[in-house]
Amino acid sequence: PIRDVYAREILDSRGNPTIEVEILAGEKTVGCASVPSGASTGKYEAIELRDGEARYMGKGVEHAADHVNAQIAPEIVGMNVLDQRGLDEVLKRLDGSRNKGKLGANAILGVSMAAARTAAKISERPLYTYLGGVQARTLPVPMMNIMNGGRHADNTIDIQEFMILPVGAPDFREGVRMCAEIYQSLKALLGQRGCNTAVGDEGGFAPDLPDAKEALSMLMDACKMAGYQPGKDMLFALDVAASELYDEKLNAYVFDGESRMHGQKVLRTTDQMIAYYEELLAEFPIYSIEDPLDEEDWEGWVKMTAHLGENVYLVGDDLFVTNTERLKKGIELGAANAILVKINQIGTLSEAFDAVEMAHRAGWQAIISHRSGETVDTMIADIAVAFNTGLIKSGAPCRSERVEKYNRLMRIEEMLGKTADFPCYMDTPVLK
Ligand code: PGA
Ligand code: ZN
């Protein structure tokens, strides 16, 4: 049984406060976990509770920590820490609101995560088998975000993320090597072309490039420079985070950086966005496009999925916010064909698992993801293996809070030994 629960305020990778929770169970088993935080957050995410007081510019999480210590702890002390679902249900019920705004999704998730870690320790099993059972043996293909823009940097690239997927790798470790080599090649290339090589929030480079095509061309060049063939060894993925570009009054997407670099205002309507993506798909080997349109534009998503869904994965992040109600709607409407799963968007591990399961049953891809504000907690690595998603997004092979997830996966691959599996996406529609 759980004997003690304690939350404290710590810092995340952007220097903002976040919650860390420790749970003591059994004789003296302690599991500890910390919660990530987004910047380009979706409107429908569960509520991350911030103090709003003077300290830390309003971003303190002392109230959320108090909620764990004063309200959640007394209710779950004595409960079986191995009953993850039961615990998550109690957490949901204690909050009682639709969006976990009362206790805070950050408070709730910290407890949900710490419970899993304590339980795995008590069971003397690695976290990925505790959560996923003996079938948990598939390593995810890493989607490494090596060029940052949008809200994650202050450069002129409007699209938030440019990712590379080592689909030609025989195993996870080799995939990491390929990505890291391309990352270093990209750095050299940027240097040669007189571009800045400072990095953004997720460790990718954040140069001032004229537009997305230029960024993708740089990725192509970096791949070749490292000795890999784009479209064969490597595929690309974008996260447009289009809700951040959408202007309601203009009913169009505003590309501020592109406007500045081209010296004229660049706006794209929904139809123009879809046509633009079609152009990019024709020119570059793109596996997936995340949040290509605004989080409210169900109609546009349906149109885009009907038009391009056979050729590319269209990933709903802000659209679905890891919420099975919204995902169900998307599946019924045919809006998107993949979901991004962020545990802090929904607030408990059980609900994140339900979202993955619902997606898989519909024949969709699910991608486990970090947030732009992270800690060194590596739980999402274990979750990707446990939930059998075959894909993970954890930023660039740079900055310890990003790299630690990939390092954890290399260790997991080693533990699994010969039973480890690494999926092959060579048959994805884009390659046919
Ligand atoms: P966020 O960005 O964590 O800032 O929301 C990540 C993403 O949009 O995928
Ligand atoms: Zn996203």
Image (cartoon, grey):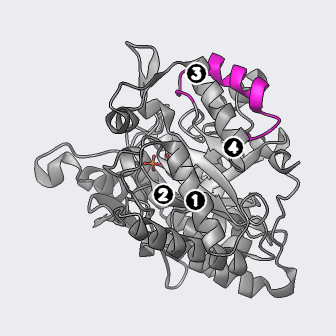
Secondary structure beneath dot 4 equals helix
| Quadrant in the rendering for residue 326 | top right
Q: Nearer the viewer, mark 3 or mark 4?
A: 4
Mark 3 and mark 2: Cα distance apart in space:
24 Å
Give the labeled residue for mark 3. 272
Residue shown at 82% from the left, 65% from the top: 423
Give the labeled residue for mark 4. 283
Q: Magenta segment range?
A: 293-314
The single residue placed furthest to the left in the displayed view is 54
Secondary structure beneath dot 3 equals helix
Mark 4 Cβ and ligand 2 under 8 Å apart:
no
Question: Mark 2 packing: few (<14 Cα in 10 Å), some, or many (20+)?
Answer: many
Query: Percent x, y for residue 150?
Result: 40, 44
Q: How many marks?
A: 4
- Taking the image as drawn, is residue 124 in sight? no
Give the labeled residue for mark 1. 219
Mark 3 or 4, nearer chain start: 3
Q: Are the two marked residues, 1 and 3, in contact with CB atoms closer than 8 angstroms?
A: no
Q: With 312 as the anchor, is 156 left or right in this view?
A: left
Q: Are the two marked residues, 3 and 2, in contact with CB atoms closer than 8 angstroms?
A: no
Q: Looking at this view, is 228 or 105 the one in front?
A: 228
Query: Percent x, y for residue 14?
Result: 30, 61
Residue shown at 41% from the left, 32% from the top: 255
Give the labeled residue for mark 2. 147
Query: Percent x, y for residue 126?
Result: 67, 79
Residue shown at 71% from the left, 20% from the top: 303
Mark 2 and mark 4: Cα distance apart in space:
18 Å
Mark 1 Cβ and ligand 1 under 8 Å apart:
no
Q: Are the two marked residues, 2 and 4, in contact with CB atoms closer than 8 angstroms?
A: no
User: Is 308 included in the stretch rendered in magenta?
Assistant: yes
